[in-house]
Image (cartoon, rainbow, N blue to C red):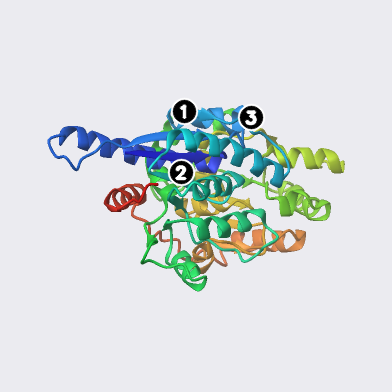
Amino acid sequence: MKWATVVGARPQFIKAASLSRAIARRNERALRNRQRASEKRIEEVLIHTGQHYDYLMDRVFFEELEIPEPDYHLGVGSASHGRQTARMLEGLEEVLEKERPDLVIVYGDTNSTLAGALAAAKLHLPVVHVEAGLRSYNRNMPEEINRVLTDHLSTFLFCPTETSVRNLKKEGIQDGGARVVTKVGDVMYDSILHYSRRADAKATVLRDLGFEPEASGKGSDSTSCDYYLATLHRAENTDDRKRLLSILSALDEMAKRVPVILPLHPRTEKRIEAYGLTFKTRRLTVIQPVSYLNMLKLEKHARAILTDSGGVQKEAFWLGVPCLTLREETEWVETVQRRGNLLVGADKERILEGVQSIEKRRFLKSRTSMEKGNASARIVETLLSARLNKP
């Protein structure tokens, strides 16, 4: 049987790596049990749209996560949302017509996700959406449009949380009939479990930046350094000069007391230059985007994390690190409900108040993860047991 996987951006590389490992483990079992006719090998066809193409946003992830070379690389690159999605759709349709896979797997909420779902649906191929059902209910976010449309095109909807299952039900999408809707957990947590120790052993970013973790007395895994970590890339923040200036001003203010490390996303860098903005303190350390292992290490040892990234919010929660989200809403409502995450938007004063809340330990009382680390295996087994009607 043949499964096509569509990726294009760094969060998708991480998720796809988890599922690819689960597929490989299942193929190894099938090889050992080859006398059983039902144990068919899964052939995974990996299609990279080229949405992220810079080495630090793309190539390093394939090397570090040991992801196989893509079978197809569409080389789409940067463009407006409509133009980029259209180019992806054209390239994906050609590849899918040639390969005729049994199903097409897409991840998350990027333009690559939507293009993969559209191309597959128009060819009557089952769409598998990993990380289905997330909602911010903010239609100004392009990611929200992508995830809503993808869910409505999908045959298999693998949800990370009970909330995401309920969100789908509100829209008339539920398990039964031609659709499979199920909570499987989060494939990114699978990656945390798999790569966390490797990050501690191999990632050099803290040493390179002159920070060394100090034991907190709670065990060897509970160490922290005296810095805040910030990430910033969402269009709602970077494409609005007032919001971007307010966030950067807050980071500048924070850095007067405690160093701030900011791996700078290419989009954010371009907007800072275009708006003529500058950083005012040397204690705000601006670095290039980092690899996944280095990012895990930065997250794990940070005093706190400020971010507008959904993935970083989750990773902070799982690692037990306080998080301030630079948005007015989040798809990952559980992180807020369990007091591991605080929404502060882009207002400078709210951000600084959030930092004060962290310093005074006014929240973050419970950060217990409900994950089991077997989401990828559950997805593979569910797909294998399904009856696929391939045209």
Q: Residues within 10 Å of mark 1 (few under 14, many from 20)?
A: few
Q: Residues within 10 Å of mark 2 (few under 14, many from 20)?
A: many
Check contact, mark 2 vs mark 1: CB within 8 A: no
Whichever of labels 2 and 3 marks the residue nearer the N terminus, that label is 2
- Residue drawn at point x = 57 percent, y = 40 percent: 9
For badge 3, the amino acid type reads: Asp
Residue farthest toward the bottom in the current orientation of the protein:
170
Task: Residue 204: give x, y in percent of width and height.
Answer: 52, 29
Spatial CA span between label 3 and label 1: 19 Å
Residue pointed to by mark 2: 15
Check contact, mark 3 vs mark 1: CB within 8 A: no
- Residue drawn at point x = 55 percent, y = 66 percent: 363
**Left or right side of 247 for 293:** left
For badge 1, the amino acid type reads: Asp
Residue pointed to by mark 1: 71
Task: Identify the secondary structure beneath mark 1.
Answer: loop
**Left or right side of 372 for 94:** right
Task: Residue 28: give x, y in percent of width and height.
Answer: 24, 34
- Residue drawn at point x = 86 percent, y = 43 percent: 275
Task: Identify the secondary structure beneath mark 2.
Answer: helix
Mark 2 or 1: in front is 1
Spatial CA span between label 2 and label 1: 18 Å
Question: Where 100 sits versus 189, above or below?
Answer: above
Indicate which disc residue 54 carries.
Answer: 3
Residue farthest toward the right in the current orientation of the protein:
276
